[in-house]
Structures are given as structure tokens and as C-alpha cells.
Image (cartoon, rainbow, N blue to C red):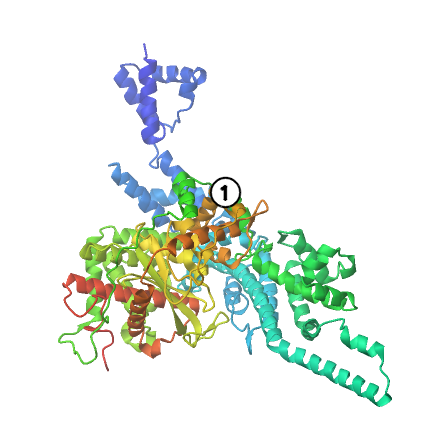
Amino acid sequence: MISRERVLIFLREKQESDGGYSGNDLTKLAELLMVTPFGLRRRLSFWIRTDKEFSKFIYFGKEKPPITLFEFFKIDHELRENPIKVKKGIYGDIQEERKSRNQKPLAESTFYRHVKQEVLAIYCSEADNWFKSKDIHFPDDYSLEKNRESLQTIFTFSDLKTYGGANTDAICQRLTKAKEAFSTYNVEANRFYPEILSRRKFLQKLLGSIPPNQQSEAQAKLIFEIQAAYIIECKDLLIGELIHKLGRLKQSDNASRQKVENQLRTTALESIRKNLKEMDESGKIDPYIIKKHANVLIDEEILARIELLRKHSDAYRSILKHLNDFTNNMTSGVKFQRNESRTIYQLAVGEKTWDKLNEQGKRSIARKPDLMKAIDMENADIVPLIAVSRLIDHIKKGKITFDESYYFQDIGERLKNINLNLQDCYLTPEILEQFIDGTYQINGFPQFDLPTTEFEASDDEMSTTWTDLSVILKEVSTYIRYSNPGWFREHQELFKKQTDSLFWIEYTEEEFAQRLYDSIGFLGRNFRYRDSEEFYGLKYFIQRYISAATLILELGFIHRCMEQLSNKKIECVVIDTMGIDARIKSILSDYHGRYHTIGFADLRAVSIDMTPIYSGVCRSTDSEAMNIVEVIDEVKEICGDRVCIYTGNGHTTTKISAGMAFLSHGVIAGGRIHYEPTWNLKEGAISRLRNNVILLNEVGKLLRDEPELGRVMAMRKNVYVDKLNVRKMVDDFGYLILKNVSKMGFPIDDICNAVERSNNLKKKTRIVEGSRTRVEPNEAELLLKSGELILCIVGLYHLLKGWKGHGSPINLSDVRLIRPA
């Protein structure tokens, strides 16, 4: 009698361990049960037909295949996700898994044969499979050479400037050409942008590392991603420049307004004098003339505004034309968050007229009763011009959103799709009540041991010994790898993620470490490849392997080692900016008023003892809030969750910045406040906060998952979820934080002095060519982060040697950065 239970247990074990059973397994089972294999198979065949518990087991055939069912599913999943990824990575993962289970290694020939069969089974060909996996139409006449060339002629931000700023006509034309070229794929660019977002700055470098005649499928994928990213970024640039253009018009009006008003008053005064003289000469008083001058129908202030609007009418119409051109008359990919916004657009294009508006509608457009009165007096021609100004203002504030855009997208729709767990919440009803009552306990404000001396000795104090930076780099590299056994593995995993598994690190751990630290020394000191023959061999490595994420990972390793040696934990960070003068004046370059530079700003975050943590490129006109979520996110990635407070140097902390920092990462904003937060929030605002704690935490989770959205939130005044302005709620919550912080004394001035010394130290690392940068902002980020890494590497080296010198161990007084010729 064959035991049903023993057979069932045996088959379950095989299903769990191997994913199924084979004929050889049944032969072994028959021997154990002391029955014939034929009899066991007959009984098992009967059970499979009549018993549901047996029908779920998978039969392989006579012999178990060399690739298990789980490995089959893994290969199938990987190939469906990205069919052109490096197969060596999949094979290596399978071998690691087999090794951990003490199983026999899979033969390489068997693996690659199966992969080839699987690719053909899924995609029916060996070409253009990545596009098929993403449901992208691949053009029959696709030319790799022409598409790669288009990145230099169409999908580029070069030649978009004119004297005095950006050329909006050229940007609009370039966007039209780019969308026309991209239309061959028959997909929308915004569908792919979220997954490209974190890698977009690395894509161009990665493509540049591939020779034109190699890896054609990888090139086609990278080109597509660069083109898709360009569509979104060019549209954002155009909208941003239209907002900027309107701002310049208003600036020009404000500068001319007083002059125009004075001219109008002069004309009116001359008219009064002329009429009075005529009455004097005639000897008669004309009541009509007196009444006309005594009761002026339109004030000079309103007349001046009307005259200035008409003066710039062509510019206003140009702005409207550009909006209509890339939105198909505001019908394609545009969402009006408020009916008022649609009415304003209809007024701008002439679909509605002034006389058809009710009193409330007129008031919402003109705002001032005197201007409404003036428009009614045969000045209705300025209504479309005012409407264009209001339209751009609504776009800027978030009342009008665009689908094929990132910075002007509808965040409210994103918030509706957030899945929130309790672990994702920094704000609870209890914590909110503490903020409302002003009793929230702010930790991370101990009596910091602030540096009171200069970081370096004076020039008169000559060092007795000098150490070349190359020696320091080599020694620290060895120590980092010794202290972190998984160092190379983490870099491999990051590289796979950054390149979407298109490439594999082709160096040994020793070779990779040497080139990585040589590259950090090269980039951090602001060198050029032609400055020394030893730099010639780094170009390929930097193109292929160095990204911002690579440097962040290495900075994390260095910080952990410094914490272990110094026993200091970072809880508070200080944020500051330095103006960077750029040799290449891109369309994104700005004039920095404080530093008098033209280029961009180096946004830095350092610890209280001035240990560098973060460095990134931002526009000189950026507010703190625009970058705060990205900064805090990276700081926490490097330093861990102990960071609980930040402060700023030389700028104020805003309500939105404070609100986003806490909701996304639980960090308190402790910077300067430009007003005294003494007033209490209105009951309606407090009630909205209490009723929407979950929604506020959803905002925090969205910002934490996608830190770049912090800029989007900061740029807006309105973000709607079911007609509720979430942006205003974050503002109100930020005010409660600042009100609690204002009650505490914090030595901001002392901290600011120390930060300036740290800034000066970084300038010394980049002293070549006076710290000027010769590359585009995307590339410049690598130089700035490498500069911070050099400071940390030198600090770690001094700690390893038992630093007993002047000031902080982050000190260049005994380091030879550049060997004199």
C-alpha cells in the first residue's frame, strides 16, 4: 500500500527546494517506499486527477533541468524588465545564490543558451528589445548616428541666449523641433521622466563613454532617455523664462512708473495753467473748465499703468503666443485648478470680453476700483494685457499645471496615490498639539563646541613636514576598504542601479579604488586633463564610473570612519552658499549679488565642527526652501537618522522650508527668522491642520521618496487636493515650528563665522584658475562634491595619524595639494 501522506510530504519538500519534481525523484521515492516505480507513477497519476493537493506540483520530466524554476523566473523577470542589461550580472547573482545553498555551480554555456532562448521567446527577435519591453514604437528608419548627432543640434541648451538673457523665441523653436523629433517613438516623455530623474545628469557622460560603433542597443536606450528628459526640462525652462520675462517687464514698469506719472502730471499742470491764463485774458470764469480740472476722471497713477501696459503690449502678446504654441491653445496637457484661471485665459485670447464680466469678475481681474473705472472709459484694450499678466501669475503660483512638465506638474494628483504606513509619519496628532501649544521640546541644541580659532596656522608658521595629497589618497583608500569589507560590493550595486545594469565594473577592487581616489583628487582640485600626463588615463573612468551618487556613497564611508575615530555624532548641520564663477556661461548661469560672480552657487552643508557633508549646484537666485529637502535627504543618507536640526548662514528660514524639512525627514529648521513670530494662527488654519495630519504626512512621504519635488512645492503658493490648498497648510505648520524655535537662543553668528572659514578652506582645494569652473552645471557638481571629499579625506588621514596640530584635523597646513613646477 502506497502511503498518500509520505508521497505528499516528499513532493512538497521538492516543490519548496527545487520548484518541482523529476522522474528520478520518483524512482528514489519508490525505493524508499519499497514499491515499483511503475506502480508509484500510476498511483500518483490517479491522485493528480482526483486530488487537488497533488495537482499543484510541477513535473520537470525524467531529469531535473540544470536551471531551477526559481532561476527560470528570475531570468524571465530580469529580461522582461530590461532585456539588454549585462547578463553577467544575472549569472553572478545566480552563482551567489547557489553558493549560499551549497549547490553545484551553473554552467556558463547553459545559462547563456537559456537566456538566448528566453529572449527569442519573449520578444521574437534579438534587436530593439528594450523598446519592445517598454511598449515604445521603434522607428523602422532609425539611425543611431543621426540620433546621437541630434543631442548636439536639437536636444541641447546651447545657443539659446541672446544679449541680456534667454531667447524665448529660440527656446520655443527648439522645444518644437525636439518634440517633432521625439514623436517618432509615439510615446509621451513624461511617462518615463520619473525613472530617469535620479540618473539624468549621468546619462550624457555614460553615453560619451561608449564608442559610436559599440553597444548599439545601449546607445539607443541612453539616447532615448536623454531625449525624453530634454523634452520635460526644456518645457520647464521655457515656462520659467516666460515667468522671468514677465518679471522683467514689471521691473521695467516699476523703474519707469514715476517718470511717466511725473510726465502726466506735468502735462496736466501745463493744461491747468493754460486754461487759467485764457480765463484771465478773457476776464471770464468758465465753470466747465474749473469742474474738469477739479474732478479728474482717471488718476495719473492709473494712466501711467495703462500707458506702460500699452508700451509693452508686443511683449505680452509674445508671452501668450509662446504659451499657445506649446500647449495647442491651452488645450493639450493643461489643467486649470480654478475656474478663475480659465476665465483669465479666455480674456487674454479674446474669447471673453470685459463687458460680459459681472462685478465680481471685473474686480478679480482689475483688483483696483480706479482701474475698473478707467477700463470702462474706453480702455478695454488693456484687459487682455492684464489677463496675460494674471495668467503667468497663476502658472507661477500653481493654479495652472502642465502634464508634460516636472516643476509645473499637478502634485495634488501625486498625493492622491501615496500609500502611507505608520513608519512613514513624523507628525502625529500629539506632536501637532505640542507645536500649537508651544511646548514642543527641540533636541539637538546642546552647547556646541564651536571652533574659535582659524582652521589653519598663519603663513608665518611653516610646516616642518609636508605630505603629498597622492600619498594621503592612497593611504585613506586602503583604510576605507579595510574598515568596510562590503565596500566594493556596494559600489558594484550602485553602478548597476545607476546604469540600469547596462554595464559591469570591469576593474578589480584594487584597480577601481586607485582610479576612484585619483579621480577625486583630480576633480576636487579643479584640474584639467592636460594639466598633467597622469590625468590622461582618468577621462574614461570619470565618464563611465563617476557620478554624484558614487561620490555620495564614498563620502558616507569616510564619515563612518571619522565617527568611529573621533566618537562624534552629527546631529546638527549648517547650510551656506558660495558663488562660483563659471568659464562657460550657460543659459542657467546667474549673477550672484553677494559674491559678484556669474555662474551658479555652491550650496554646502557642514556639521557644527565644520566637517563637510553636502555640496551641490544651485542657481544663485534659489531660495533655501527650493533645495532644503534634497540637502536634508542627502545629509541623512550620509550621516544617518541622528541629524535632527539644521541652521543657515546669512539667509532667513521660511515657513515652507521649516514645514517640508520636518514632514519629510523630521528635521527642525533653526535658522534666522526675519520677523518675530508672535501672532497665533487663526482657528480655521489650526482646525485644517488637526483634520489633515494624514495628508500632511503624505506630503512628507512624497518629498522623502522624491526629494526633487521640494523645489516644486517651494516654487508654488497653491497645491490642491480635492480643492484643499495643501501648500498653505504646510506653510502654517512651518510657522508653528518657527514659533517654537524662536523661543530658543542659538549662537547663529558664531556658527556663521566658522562656516566662512570652512568655505575659505574649500576655495584652497580648488585654487587652480582662481576656483573658476570650466564645465556645465551638471558636471560642476562632481567637482564641488570632490572638493568636499578631499577635505574629509585629509581630516580622516590626520585622525589616523593622531592629529595634534593647529585647529581642526580638517586642515591643509601640512598637505601639498599641488607640487610646484
Tell me the quadrant of the picture where the N terminus can be found. top left
Q: Position of residue 387 (x, y in %)?
A: 68, 63
Type of amino acid under label 1: Asn
Q: Position of residue 134 (x, y in %)?
A: 51, 48
Identify the residue position indicated by label 1 in the image. 692
Q: Tell me if residue 728 comes above or below residue 66 in the rendering.
A: below
Is 274 positioned to the left or the right of 348 in the image? right
Camera-side residue: 581 or 689? 689
Instruction: Please identify the quarter of the rendering in which residue 755 is found.
Output: bottom left
Q: Tell me if residue 744 comes above or below residue 172 in the rendering.
A: above
Camera-side residue: 284 or 57? 284
Is 91 positioned to the left or the right of 377 in the image? left
Q: Position of residue 727 (x, y in %)?
A: 52, 52
Q: Residue at x 54, y 48 (%)?
A: 412
Tell me the quadrant of the picture where the C terminus can be found. bottom left
Q: Position of residue 65 (x, y in %)?
A: 35, 34
